[in-house]
Amino acid sequence: MFNMHRTTIFLDSQLQKRLRSQAKKQGKTVTELIQNFVRHGLNLSQQPQSPKRSQIKIPSADLGDFLVDISDREQIQSVLEDHEQFNRY
């Protein structure tokens, strides 16, 4: 269990009623609800989050259909042989 500290907060009666009602609807204790509100307000979660990375845009282009069917072994061999012959000259 986490190391917890007891704290006193002062709520007006209307806020206290709404808090109890909300806790009942969510099936949580008032303490759990307040802890969640405080975490959310402080932008914290129960698990540490990794720092957000900036999004970068990577250029892309449509290069058309594939020139070789990679499941056709003979076609790949033929293209490689043509490539080797071309590079000899």
Image (tube, grey):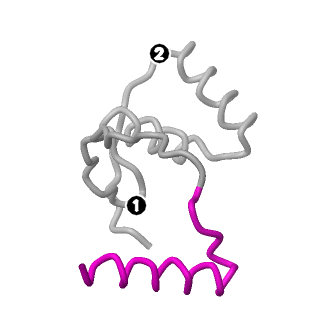
Point out residue 26 in the picture as x, y percentages from the top left corner: 71, 39
Q: Amino acid at mark 1?
A: Gln
Q: Residue tagged by mark 2?
A: 12
Q: Residue at x 69, y 79 (%)?
A: 71
Q: Nearer the viewer, residue 35 or 89?
A: 89
Q: Residue furthest front?
A: 89
The number of numbered discs placed on residues in the rendered structure image is 2
Point out residue 20 in the picture as x, y percentages from the top left corner: 64, 31
Q: Is residue 67 above or below residue 83?
A: above
Q: Amino acid at mark 2?
A: Asp
> Magenta residues, as a range?
66-89
Point out residue 38 in the picture as x, y percentages from the top left corner: 38, 38
Q: Is residue 64 above or below residue 89?
A: above
Q: Comparing marks 2 and 1, which lies closer to the viewer?
A: 1
Q: Residue at x 57, y 80 (%)?
A: 76
Q: Residue at x 55, y 86 (%)?
A: 77
Q: Residue tagged by mark 1?
A: 47
